[in-house]
Amino acid sequence: MTTKHINSILMVFTAIVVLCGCSKDALDYRKYLDGKERIYPGFAGKVGAAPGNYRIKLNWKASPDPSVTHYRIFWNNSADSLEMKAPDRSVPDVSVIIPKLVEYNYSFTIYSYDKAGNKSVPVQISNVKVYGDSYKSSLTNRFLVSTDPYQLDDDGITLNFEKPDTINITTEIRYTYKDGTIHKSVLSPDENSIRLADYKTGTKIYFRSAYVPVKSAIDTFYTADFDSLSNIMVPVDKSLFRPLKLANDVGTYSSETSLSKLWNGNKAPTGYPDIFHSDDKSALPHHFTFDMGKAIANLAQFEIIGRDCCNNPTKFEIWGIEDITGAETQSPGNSAGWTAESRGRGWTLLKTVERSDDGSAPFKVNLPDGLPAMRYIRIRVIEVASGDAYYSNISEISFWNK
């Protein structure tokens, strides 16, 4: 048999096999496609989500398929959806904001569509959190440093804040200028203090912090309200202070070391004669008295600065009264009955102060809350650092009120 005859027989056999393989059963899959070819447009790529305030931003890479005309996003088990037109082919990135959501974790499914209505395979992004009032209610304003919330001076005030949470993005501060106008300043999360120049002493300072739940968030969340820094301690005006000499008050060493040296503006220990220096006629404990010029409500803090060398008070009492009519004590400051007589004549013990150093450095103490208004102050020196029985020296004293 020739080669030509063999090839003819193989071709006939192959045709028979092909015809047998094309049976009706082999084409049964067509009933699922309605006899048509199924087309899948290109799908969205690299899907991401950015949360917001009762809304979410979805973003993805546009499908490179030129047949894609629009996208549809489904959520809530496909009960809700949103449709958007596909951007121009020159735009590679697609994004859409879905509003009016609830505070919940969502899953979204994105389909691409062509003009014939064919849709792509689904692309899903799950566990996308939406934030709202519940999250906002958990936020607190940045905390001031409790032990040293501010420093007040003649030119303004400096506020000291604790280190913030990592999601804090800013703190807005509102305060009153000396001219009465309201100003705003902003404290960034990498700053722990802020200077408010020309602050009007005695006015409230308001502050409110802002946060984002995650770095990618599209909305900023603010705390429910401003906190206020109120009852800021204001220096009592020492220009009104005047010396006063009551019965049994200690005298001064010389005219150069009078009581008026106690309010001449010293910020650090000074030396003779720029100090108050008692005489040696009244043994310790002894006292001196001065007039603040007017009644001061809410005295809150006291500071004493000693001399640069010696005889600095290390234990003393601060007394006050609003009206000295009938308030002069007749007992010497070192008598056993002096305290009882002072109370009986209306004096109030504001504070007993003890310090363990040499008494020279500036030393502040807080006074009790709720003190009555005071105009006249009496300092009763009980002990001095040098151990001297008569002399007491002081460079400066200051008061603050709220």
Image: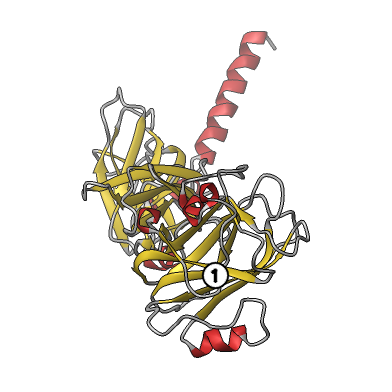
Q: Where is residue 277 in the image (x, y as percent from the top left)?
A: 60, 54
Task: Point out the image quarter for the N terminus.
Answer: top right
| Residue beneath the point at 56% across and 62% down | 251
- Examine the rendered structure and indicate whether residue 267 appears above or below residue 375: above
- Examine the rendered structure and indicate whether residue 6 appears above or below residue 89: above
The one nearer the camera, 73 or 102, is 102
The one nearer the camera, 158 or 34, is 158
* Quadrant in the picture for residue 106: bottom left
As drawn, is 149 to the left or to the right of 130?
A: right
Task: Point out the image quarter for the C terminus.
Answer: bottom left
Q: Is residue 120 visible?
A: no
Q: Can residue 1 be seen in this view?
A: yes
Q: Where is residue 141 in the image (x, y as percent from the top left)?
A: 44, 59
As drawn, is 368 to the left or to the right of 106?
A: right
Q: Is mark 1 on a helix, strand or loop?
A: loop
| Residue beneath the point at 53% across and 33% down | 18
* Quadrant in the picture for residue 130: bottom left
> Which residue is labeled 1 in the image?
249
| Residue beneath the point at 34% across and 54% down | 201
Q: Position of residue 171 (x, y in %)?
A: 41, 49
The one nearer the camera, 190 or 370, is 370
| Residue beneath the point at 47% across and 46% down | 265
